[in-house]
Amino acid sequence: EMCIRDRIVRSTDNGSTFDNVTSSTTNDLYGVVFGNNTFVAVGDNGTIVRSTTDNGSSWDNVTSGTGNYLRGVSFGNSTFVAVGQSGKVIRSTNNGSSWSETGDLNTDRKELGGAGTVNAGIVFGGGPTLRSCTELFDGSTWSETADMITARNSVGSAGSQNAALVSGGQTPGAVGNTEEWNGSAWAEVANLATARQGLGSSGATAQLGVAAGGNPASANSTDATEEWTQGQNVKTITD
């Protein structure tokens, strides 16, 4: 399952092909996660949608309790956690039905990337002043750690607190820069084939990553989907 702006696309053949799914919102969506047989996606203006009964075929709106943009969501220990604009962090312990606030980030920002679980999260980048700062979450508080190499926002992100991937974004123009997090520091790896911002991404950096959609320039969008494997170049698999 993947979000591309206000669209949701779904694959039932390990990412070889994707089909469009009817979304319950017209707001842009930036992050999606699966846990406890439930898909949860987050986006603009505190938007949260979820799919619980049919493997992502249909989606319902959920009240988040915030109007802040939400840029990432993760699942662990039966809890969903979403992060977003101005350091906003919210969580749900009832399968995404209702949400409440938790500890805020040290640096206020929006359009940031994130990955991990409820007890081991990581967020990085953001804006509107371009950020490279990275913070780790231990289940209750955030702590600052090593910065990204390239400051940017509107990134694609995937992975875990110990092995994360950040790709694309804007600096302020669209970029293809890709960096890998090893648990203590960021390192540059192969760039995206198409420089873009506001893209969706998913996967684990030790295995396979997928980046889709986004804006190569401020006025245009792309349906390009790229596959990334550790130690190898990004390649376009659909366009």
Image (spheres, rainbow, N blue to C red):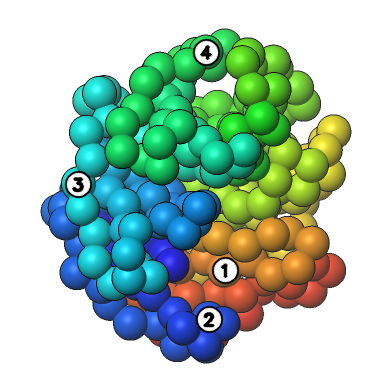
Give the percent coordinates (x, y) of residue 140. Answer: 61, 15
Which of marks 1 and 2 precedes in the sequence? 2
Give the percent coordinates (x, y) of residue 224. Answer: 43, 76
Q: Nearer the viewer, mark 2 or mark 1?
A: 2
Q: Amino acid at mark 4?
A: Gly
Secondary structure at numbered mark 2: loop
- Whole-angstrom CA distance, mark 4 to mark 3, is 24 Å
Q: Are marks 4 and 2 in contact (CB under 8 Å)?
A: no
Q: Nearer the viewer, mark 3 or mark 2?
A: 3
> What residue is rendered at 57% in x and 11% in y?
106
- Whole-angstrom CA distance, mark 1 to mark 4, is 30 Å
Task: Kindly identify which residue carries mark 3.
Answer: 61
Task: Kindly identify which residue carries mark 2.
Answer: 15
Tell me: residue 227, above or below residue 206.
Answer: below
Q: Nearer the viewer, mark 1 or mark 3?
A: 3
Q: Amino acid at mark 3?
A: Asn
Left or right of 220? Residue 142 is: right
- Whole-angstrom CA distance, mark 4 to mark 2, is 35 Å
Q: Are marks 4 and 3 in contact (CB under 8 Å)?
A: no
Secondary structure at numbered mark 3: strand
